[in-house]
Amino acid sequence: MRSQHWFGGLDKDAFIHRSWMKNNGLPDDAFDGRPVIGICNTFSELTPCNAHFRGLIEHIKAGVLEAGGLPLEFPVFSCGESNLRPTAMLFRNLASMDVEEAIRGNPIDGVVLMAGCDKTTPSLVMGAASCDLPAIVVSGGPMLNGRLKGRTIGSGTDVWKFSEDVRAGVMTPAEFMAAESAMSRSPGHCMTMGTASTMASMAEALGLALPGNAAYPAVDAHRARLARLSGRRIVAMVAEDLRPSHILTRAAFANAIRVNGAIGGSTNAVVHLLAIAGRVGTELTLEDWDRFGRDVPTILNLMPSGTFLMEDFCYAGGLPAVMKEIADLLDLDNPTVTGQSVGANIADAENYNPDVILPRDVALTQQGGIAVLKGNLAPQGAILKPSAATPALMQHRGRAVVFETIDHYKQRIDDPDLAIDETSIMVLKNCGPKGYPGMAEVGNMALPQKLLKKGVRDMVRISDARMSGTAFGTVVLHVAPEAAVGGALALVKDGDWIELDVAGRRLHLDVDEAELARRREEWTPPEIAMPGGYQGLYVERVMQADRGADLDFLVGCRGHAVPRESH
Ligand code: FES
């Protein structure tokens, strides 16, 4: 066991390692060579989606003990989506560094990754992938369905709708306030198919979590059982030396991308999977998202693309049932944390509700994958989620209305004199990884009040930002290179014609080359606030969205060789 480099032997160092651990109440035989299982806990009361982890971890520990391991919990940076400013994504890479170094530097043989809120899953998997010790994901599970005045409401998705209804004058502020309590009724993460549910599904689809991980509600006893079984399983994985690099093959990523299309998953999965692949050293490109996901039907009828919520998904059979419906599109031989193949894991799955998990011929869309757009406006690519877009707008030519920054957008959007109508294309600059350090979820800009009042609910929007996984609309995101580094997005001016052709995967700025060259000459980089510390390092070293927005020096697997002794 790797942990025996600390706990084995009779010398001074082993004395120190064991003696201090014994103040936890551990007996002599805790150090007899049994596997030490680190439990990486993102519990935080400031990350409300993960605030129930103190209870959940007891089930993991019980499972580890039952299987003959020694469970040792450790905390890591918890990226909470709802509170962290300027955006939780700014800290995903920082958290992944914390995870990586905490695993490598400690006497750990295998690790359980306790994730929930959006960025906690990718940060933990990225850190663990860079170490490549046996690892299993246990997600915290979604909240119960929101309920307001007899109707079901979903995290995030209904916030966007309600806030537009308030601005359009069809919902009162008092009703808006009442929805707050009705939306978040239990422990757990967002219960729409937002980024948290998507990443829990990605962990399961990649083979990093036990079947059922994505959908059991946080408060369901099945969740506690899954945690306990995961605790047992990680002990066996250590004996089998089953590591992330064995599971995270190119086929695993292809499976996950296809599953993302089938579930109508979040656009944020694009940057997270690219970053995870980079850490483990598996080839994956932005174009692979289109290649693997292009003809996958979206069969999961969940908000924001559809109607239902994660609780309904659980009762309908969960992710194994979705994977079985698209089994012909998956590599069924890839290994998983169960010790069995993907195919074996889903062999007995059943779809208990065809209104929630739709038959393929009545899918929400037959083009469920993420569309990767290229053109002179996005030479390194941009993305759009067809299942969340308005079909009539996916082929559109319109005049640009440009917002230089998010503050410029806020100043300008409700100006009654703004020259904008429903055929315009809203363009937001300087919100990419460097420009708005962290690449904020502002790409689904709210529409101008005057158009909302006319009943307009969608327009083409283009930016280098991300958008919440709970959001919807005909929104082109992740434009690379971003405006802040001089990408073509920086050159767009009010009134320019832009063509969006999703079927042709094209995003074109209809301005001639000579004029673009002239504008490029005139362009000066924006001032980016550089507060120093980690945020300064981030701005200096973050890569573009098509590389997963990881820090360049974190790419790759640095392994789990035992660090040199210090005493
Ligand atoms: Fe944590 Fe949505 S805010 S999952």
Image: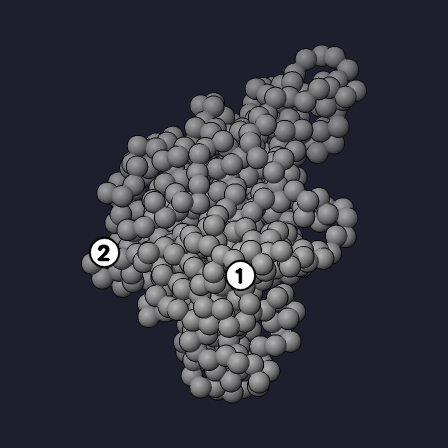
C-alpha gap between disc 2 and disc 1: 47 Å
Q: Horizontal and vertical percent for residue 305?
A: 38, 64
Name the N-terminal-most of marks 2 and 1: 2
Report the residue that reaches farthest toward the front: 514
Displayed quadrant of residue 147:
bottom left
Q: Residue at x 40, y 40 (%)?
A: 253
| Picture layout, residue 551 above or below residue 396 | above
List the residue tagged with mark 2: 360
Residue 515 numbered tag:
1
Task: Look at the image and tell me in which quarter the N terminus lies.
Answer: top right
Q: Mark 2 Cα within 10 Å, few/some/many (few <14, many 20+)? A: some
SS type, badge 2:
helix
Report the residue that reaches farthest toward the right: 567
Q: In this image, 292 relative to 90: left or right? A: left
In the foreground, 20 or 135: 135
Q: Horizontal and vertical percent for residue 21?
A: 71, 29
Q: Amino acid at mark 2?
A: Arg
In the foreground, 515 or 424: 515
